[in-house]
Each structure stands twice: as structure tokens, then as C-alpha cells.
Amino acid sequence: MKRKGLIFWLGLGVILLIILNLPSPASRALKNTTRDVLAPLQELASSYAQRLRGAGNAIRGWGGLPEKNQELQQEVMLLRQKLSELDELREQNYLLRQQLGFQKRQERNLIACSVLARDISGWWQTVRIQHDGSPMVQPNLAVLNDQGLVGKVSEVSGRTADVLLISDPACRVAVQIGDKSVFAILSGQGLSWRGRVLCKLTFINKNIKVQRGDEIYTSGLGGVFPKGIKVGSIESVTLDANGLHQSAEVEPAVDLSQLDVVFLVAQKPEDLR
Amino acid sequence: MNRLVLWVSMFTCAMIQAVVPAWHSLGQAKAPLLLGVVLYYALSRVTFQVLEASILAGLLQDSLGPIPVGFSVLAFVFVGLLVNQFRDRVFGEHWFTHVIMGIGASVIVTMILYILLVGAGLRTGVSFSFVMSKSLGMSLLGIVTFPVVYFSIEKLDRALGNVNRGEI
């Protein structure tokens, strides 16, 4: 009996050790297979959740036809994004003309993806999105919607991808404050107990005046996020304890709790510096 | 039929757990439905089935999120076996047992995951107060979800003619 117990515990220990030390390709294959197999079920669950929300909106008199509403929302998102790009193009064109130079601005190639689910464990700030299997979907692509930057792709499987939101402490974005040519690093700080998304800007030059309401855009430095995507605006500014730099709290432009459709930016080398 | 109930309840709970929003005010806690399934098997089945349920629940949670494969498996197996040790000493079908076991299991699983994630350098920025509020949030959500999960699976088990607790 004692011998049987010993064999049981030894066997269990070995199984756990094997699972914990799975080689990276095997672990990735296991995750990807599970995700792809469960993607249709997740899509179903997600569509029911959306319908519930749509029904709730209709009851409150906001909605009408939820499907039509969603379709129009997607169209508006695309149009706003295009408009934002045109504004940026106009500004860039002006600057370049001033410098007597010319550089053709490539149009961003956006891939629309629907949001399937959020992180199942609650330890990360991620969402899972569904894509059409396009080879252009790769890790580290910038993700945005009509309001601004959402995050970046962290993992990709055949039909789904995980997006690390800008509110996650592991997500760092090289940003520029308005038109001041001030560069800084934005990092996620999770959520407050009221559910407010917190982000922090660090290493801002202390000699430059930064104030509440200043808008933050991606700087294009760092090789992940293309230049000129709106990230948020400054809420408050403080001087670091060592007195060498300023820090600021940032309110993201995107409502990260209401993500239904997002766009991946298929990057072109010209977009990054 | 036993295995069918296990797989159906696991996948259903995983889908719901992934879709429901997290509780922001309490450490991003999510309704611990998969842990609820593990607890059901720990309170009503023999050790081998508890292990099967714990490993499957852990693999599902790890595969559907950014947690490295094996972390949730370890936490669920530990909790499953621990609760299973008390199976014959408690009123396994009473809702109060589910509440008490649920609170304990939620705290232990959160702590094990915290230690593993910090040890692996994956969540270094997470404060201990965040983990405490997460444990509290999971416990509170567990109080609501564990009895529901338990009685739902039990009903499914009975409907499919699976043996009940007294016969195992």
C-alpha cells in the first residue's frame, strides 16, 4: 500500500515536471492548437455576449438594430482613421515642403479583427482577437481603433491573436508629447479600483513645460508603433524624487473596456524610424 | 459519461470565464469557474478523477491566456488534491462547504500563481496589495460561483445517470 502511494506521488511529480518544462515549441503548439480549436466556441460565446449587450441597449432605447449599428460603427471607425491619417499627411506635407524635401507617405494597411475574449486568468491586460489567417498578422504589430492606440500583438496562432493592452505594465510605448518634440516612455499601470485605466509617462525632460491636457502620440521610435497614432492626454505632472526628470499620468484615448473591433497596422518599413 | 460531463463542463466554464469581464476594483479578479469544476471533482470523486480534472482545467486556463503552460496545472492539482483529502470529513453537498472550500481554494491558487509568475520574472511590477485584493475578489466571486457550478454539474451528472457521491 505504501509502495503504491509512493509510486503515485512519484508519477504525479514526473507528470507535473514534464508539463512545467515543456520545450517552447511544444508549449506554443499546445497553446495554439487549443486556441484555434476553441476559437469557434469563443466566437459563439462572444457573439452571445454582444447580443446581450445589444439587447440591453435596445431596451434602453439606444439601439434599434444591433447588427446594423455594429456595421455602421465599423465604417465610422475606418473613416475616422482615414481622416486622422489625412490630417497627419497634411501636416507632414507642410513640414516637408518647408524643408524642401519630399517623402512619399505610405498609406497604412489596416486589418480589421473582432475581439473574442479577455485574459481568462485576470493576471494580464490582454484581449484575444480573431483574424482571417493572414500571414501579415505577426507579433509586435500595433493595434488601434478609431479613438487611438489599443496595444500590440503579443502572440499569434492560426486564427487568433493576443493583444497586450497599453494598460498592462509589460507594454511600453515610445511617445511624443504634442508638437513639442518631447519624447518619453509610456507604460501601463493596470487599473484603479474604480476601473480607470492608468498609464504613466516617465523620463520627460524636466526643463520642458508639460501640462494637463497635452496630447500624446506615438513617436515611431522603438520599432513597434508607427508614428502619429494618438495615445491619450496628460492628466497630471510631477517631478521625480531625484529631480532629474518629470513623470506624468496619462488618460488613454481609447476606452479599453469597450473593445469590439480593432485594427492591426500591417507595418511597412517606411513607417518606422 | 463521466468523462463527457467533465469535458463539457470544463469547456463551458472556460468559455464563460474568458468572456465575463474582470472585477476591476478587486485586483482584476475573474469568476473562478474552472476552479469551481476542480472543486466539484475534489469533493465528489476519487483522486484519479480529481487529477484528471485539475490537469485539464489547468491546461485550458494556461492555453487560453498568457500564463506559461503548467503554472495553473500545478496550482489546480495542489488545491484539488488538498480538498480531496477532506472529502470524507465534510458535507460535500452542502453549500456552506462549497463556500468555505471556495474561499480557501481561491486564495491558495492566487498565491501559487503569484509566486510562480514573480519567480519566473513575468509579473515583476505586481504589488502584494494587488494580489491580496485579487485573492479577496476571487474569494467573493467564488462564494457566488462555486455553489452554482457544483449544483449545475451535479444535476448534469444525475441526468446522464452517473454515480452519485455515496456510491463512489
Image: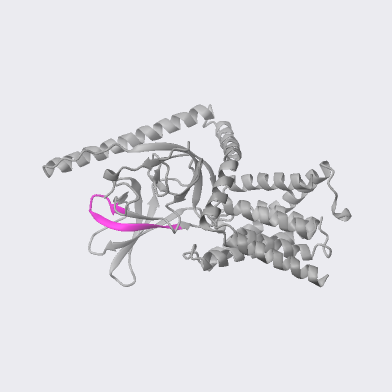
The main secondary structure of the magenta stretch is strand
Q: Whole-percent x and y of residue B94?
A: 81, 56
Q: Is residue B86 left or right of residue B79?
A: right
Q: How many marks?
A: 0
On screen, residue A188 above or below A7: above
Pick the residue in front: A23 or A188: A23
On screen, residue B131 above or below A233: below
Q: Which residue is at a point 58% across and 56% down the rendered structure image?
A: B29
Q: Whole-percent x and y of residue B19?
A: 58, 45
Q: Whole-percent x and y of residue B164?
A: 85, 51
On screen, residue A109 above or below B96: above
Q: Residue furthest right?
A: B167
Say whether residue A187 is magenta: yes
Residues in magenta, as a range: A175-189
Pick the residue in front: B24 or A38: A38
Pick the residue in front: B126 or B61: B61
Q: Whole-percent x and y of residue A19?
A: 61, 59
Q: Residue furthest left?
A: A100
Residue A181 visible within the image: yes
On screen, residue B52 above or below B7: below
